[in-house]
Amino acid sequence: MVNDYLPCATGVISDLAILKTGTNDEIFADNLAKSSAWGFAPWQSFVQGDYSFREMLLRLKINKTAEIHNIHVLEHVLTCDMADLVESGEADVAAIDTEVCFKKIFHGSPQVHVTAFVTPEFCVPQVREVSRKGFIVRLVKQDGELTGGRISFSARGY
């Protein structure tokens, strides 16, 4: 089966599982959750949004019903999981845990990256919590004390 399928593949295959037993959506989702790339959420229904993307995770499930050597795919269903919403900005952070709210509405918790760029001394930003509405961040100095400053952030999700 692998020798028949791979020459016809017109994209990059990162993971391919050949099973001798049947599978279903629940088993597939469980395997995906255990081995998926960091940052990808569970499969979800299509949500209309701002689709300016360049990468996505694809799945194609092929079921073989008889013991044959040549595989011919007559019908397939393609499901895409793509992080298509992106937001970036700047925010002032006090010397306490500070909530930063998103302007866009995410349908799940996005992946957030934070950089401190205006601070009185060296510090490291720590993202404490992330939700679909925003995140909580603090700036920690080398001695462990909190400080205030200005951050830039980017959030990417669904």
Image (tube, helix red, strand yellow):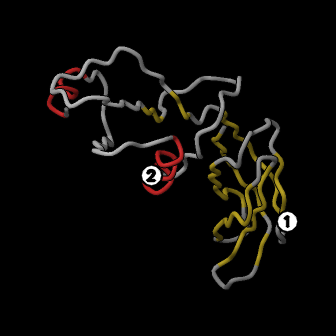
- Measured in 3D between alpha carbons, the distance from the residue under mark 1 to the one under mark 2, in whole angstroms, is 42 Å
- Return the residue at label 1: 94
Q: Amino acid at mark 2?
A: Asn
Q: Residue 101: horizontal and vertical position, in percent?
A: 83, 48
Q: Amino acid at mark 1?
A: Ala
Q: Is residue 76 above or below residue 28?
A: above
Q: Is residue 55 left or right of residue 1?
A: right
- Return the residue at label 2: 31
Q: Is residue 77 above or below residue 21?
A: above
Query: Which label lies toward us, 1 or 2?
Result: 2
Residue at (50, 52) in percent of width and height:
30
Residue at (53, 47) in percent of width and height:
26
Q: Residue 13: horizontal and vertical position, in percent?
A: 30, 35
Q: Residue 84: horizontal and vertical position, in percent?
A: 62, 31
How many marks the image carries: the answer is 2
Residue at (56, 33) in percent of width and height:
82
Q: Residue 48: horizontal and vertical position, in percent?
A: 71, 23
Q: Is residue 143 left or right of residue 33?
A: right
